[in-house]
């Protein structure tokens, strides 16, 4: 695979493949977007809500702020470490997201989700333990992740 340095709208260079074998689809930007997105919306103890339980705000508070390495956090405009604020109000500019996140964490300490596990360890846990979902119980419409081994035993 041949790679080049391509400027983004912010003139920050990112490595993108010139040819990936997928009809020219660039793999590096997909990876840089999809992997953090998985981490911000998925974890072993974050339920998926059924129609009876879902509201916009409950969905917003079921996203997760995670610590990223400083350079990655900066390159992504801190979207991973301020993701809950982004879902509560997507019009907050990135340069105010940290202050908004701090205010949300202080105002809603029981429902604000910040998961301090380093991102590489969190991604591994998600990859191995967030394989399938099952309904918690017949009278609870929330769905939770289960590891594949546990799912197979049922």
Image (cartoon, grey):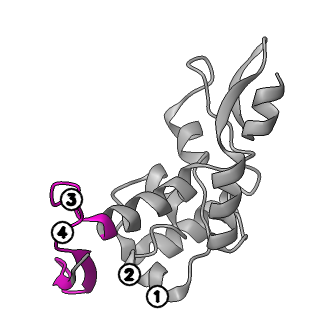
Which picture quadrant has residue 77?
bottom left
CA neighbours of label 4 inside 10 A, class few (<14), some (14 to 19), many (20+): some
Give residue 19's mark: 4
Q: CA distance from mark 4 to mark 1?
A: 26 Å
Q: Is residue 67 magenta?
A: no
Give residue 25's mark: 3
Do the numbered discs 2 and 1 sit on residues whose CB atoms are within 8 Å? yes
- Tell me the mark number nearer the camera, choosing from 3 and 4: 4
Residue 43 sits above or below residue 123 on the image: above
Segment colored magenta = 4-28
- Tell me the mark number nearer the camera, choosing from 3 and 2: 3
Going from N to C along the chain, the mark reached first, 4 or 1, is 4
Do the numbered discs 3 and 2 sit on residues whose CB atoms are within 8 Å? no
Q: Nearer the viewer, residue 80 or 112?
A: 80
Residue 61 x %, y %: 60, 47
Give residue 71's mark: 1
Going from N to C along the chain, the mark reached first, 4 or 2, is 4
The residue tagged 2 is 75
Residue that appears at 62% across and 33% down: 48
């Amino acid at each position: 695979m041949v790679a080049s340095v391509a400027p983004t709208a912010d003139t920050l260079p990112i490595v993108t493949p010139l040819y990936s074998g997928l009809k020219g689809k660039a793999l590096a930007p997909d990876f840089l977007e999809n992997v953090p997105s998985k981490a911000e919306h998925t974890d072993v103890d974050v339920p998926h809500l059924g129609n009876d339980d879902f509201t916009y705000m409950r969905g917003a508070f079921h996203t997760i702020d995670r610590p990223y390495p400083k350079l990655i956090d900066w390159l992504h405009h801190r979207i991973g470490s301020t993701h809950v604020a982004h879902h509560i109000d997507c019009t907050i500019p990135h340069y105010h997201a940290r202050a908004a996140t701090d205010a949300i964490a202080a105002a809603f300490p029981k429902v604000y989700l910040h998961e301090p596990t380093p991102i590489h360890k969190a991604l591994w846990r998600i990859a191995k333990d967030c394989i399938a979902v099952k309904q918690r119980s017949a009278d609870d419409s929330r769905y939770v992740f289960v590891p594949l081994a546990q799912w197979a035993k049922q």
